[in-house]
Amino acid sequence: MIDLPTTLRRWWHQAIAHIDFPLFFITLAIMAIGLATVNSATYDSTHRMLSQAGNMGIALVVMWLVARLPPQKLMGFAIPLYVLGVVLLLAVFLFGITVNGARRWLSLGFTRIQPSEIMKIAMPLMLAWYFQKYEATLRLKHYAGATLLLLVPFALVAKQPDLGTALLIGAAGFYVIFFAGLPWKIIGGLIAAAAAAAPFIWNMLHDYQRRRVMTLIDPTTDPLGSGYHIIQSTIAIGSGGPVGKGYLNGTQTHLEFIPEKHTDFIFAVYSEEWGLLGNAVLVLLYTLLIGRGLMIASAAPTLFSRLLAGAITLGFFTYAFINMGMVSGILPVVGVPLPFMSYGGTALVTLFLGIGILMSIQTHRMLVKK
């Protein structure tokens, strides 16, 4: 006769065996804040809030499935996922859908996808595999090869143009190369070269990208055009004061002054309602998330796991830093969402894919120790 309670307990333990609870609860707290803020930003309609809740459910399932895969199996996805991502980016370049002057989407008939999101995970996965393969014989040529692997998708995404996503992909790849032991003298040389090339880079930027940089310096030069986003978001953040105006009481939000308030500028909505105190709580949660990720990376048993965990974790930092910086007016507006808070299904699934990989690295390491 089947002992049902024992069977259920066994099933439950197996289901949660690969969940890293500190990481899970920190992420869940940020996600709950995000869902409440999306509800406030779209208070006149519950559609987006319910849709985001559905996106979160799908993302959590993806996280759970990926967490169960051992890092050795994740290595097997590195080359196929990278090649698939590059092929899809080429397809976007040739056949992609143009929306608001940018060609970023690929139509599949029944839906459309944004292949650049794949590269946010495929890039660090590929480079971590690459350095694991050459771990015993690392030379300068291997760093050059890794840079080439990074530049191909970076250039394809920047060409769309999608500077925000290109920066995230570039940062993810750079973190892997840096953690793999890139010499500081080369990093210094690259910084000097970038500074020398700044005038040429400026001339290569699209007109709207140049306007964003100039708007950062003085948004009042075009208050109803390119400067509107920054002016309104900084007003919202400043009007929140020490403790905010209270949930659902943000005037900048509900009088429709804040653009893209449920996506890229959701931080302005949150800041207006919860003020400096709420921002401190949110920054603390992100700090705990990044700290937990770096702890997992430092304890990982293989070079592949360490590089991958470190790059994914600092990727979360890059997301949050760029978004908060652009919304508060200290960085140009580049269209980067606030991780685990901004509305959007594809980005959320990609982020939780990263969380699942961190859990896989941590829990499989612990199972091996036992």
Image (spheres, rainbow, N blue to C red):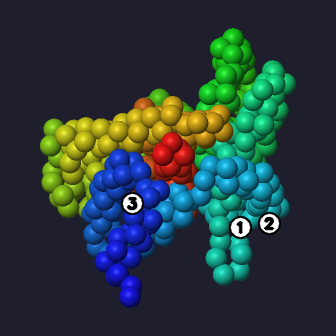
Q: Is residue 52 above or below residue 198?
A: below
Q: Residues within 10 Å of mark 3 (few under 14, many from 20)?
A: many
Whole-percent x, y for residue 91 in the image: 80, 62
Q: Residue at x 49, y 63 (%)?
A: 64
- What residue does disc 3 label? 262
| Three-letter code for the amino acid on which mark 2 is drawn | Phe
1 or 2: tag closer to the N-terminus: 2
- Alpha-carbon neighbours of circle 2 within 10 Å: few (<14), some, or many (≥20)? some
- Relative to the observer, which residue lies in front, 233 or 267? 267
Could you tell me if the residues under marks 1 and 2 are in contact, i.e. CB atoms within 8 Å?
yes
The residue that label 2 is drawn on is: 95
Q: Secondary structure at mark 3?
A: loop
Amino acid type shown at disc 3: His
| Mark 3 vs 1: CB contact within 8 A | no
Q: Is residue 37 left or right of residue 48?
A: left
Return the x and y of residue 162 as percentages of the image width and height: 64, 49
Going from the N terminus, do you reach mark 3 or mark 1 first? 1
Quarter of the N terminus within the rendering: bottom left
Residue at position x 48%, y 68% in the image: 61
The one of 316 and 69 positioned closer to us in this rendering = 69
Q: Camera-side residue: 234 or 149?
A: 149
> Residue 106 shows which numbered tag?
1
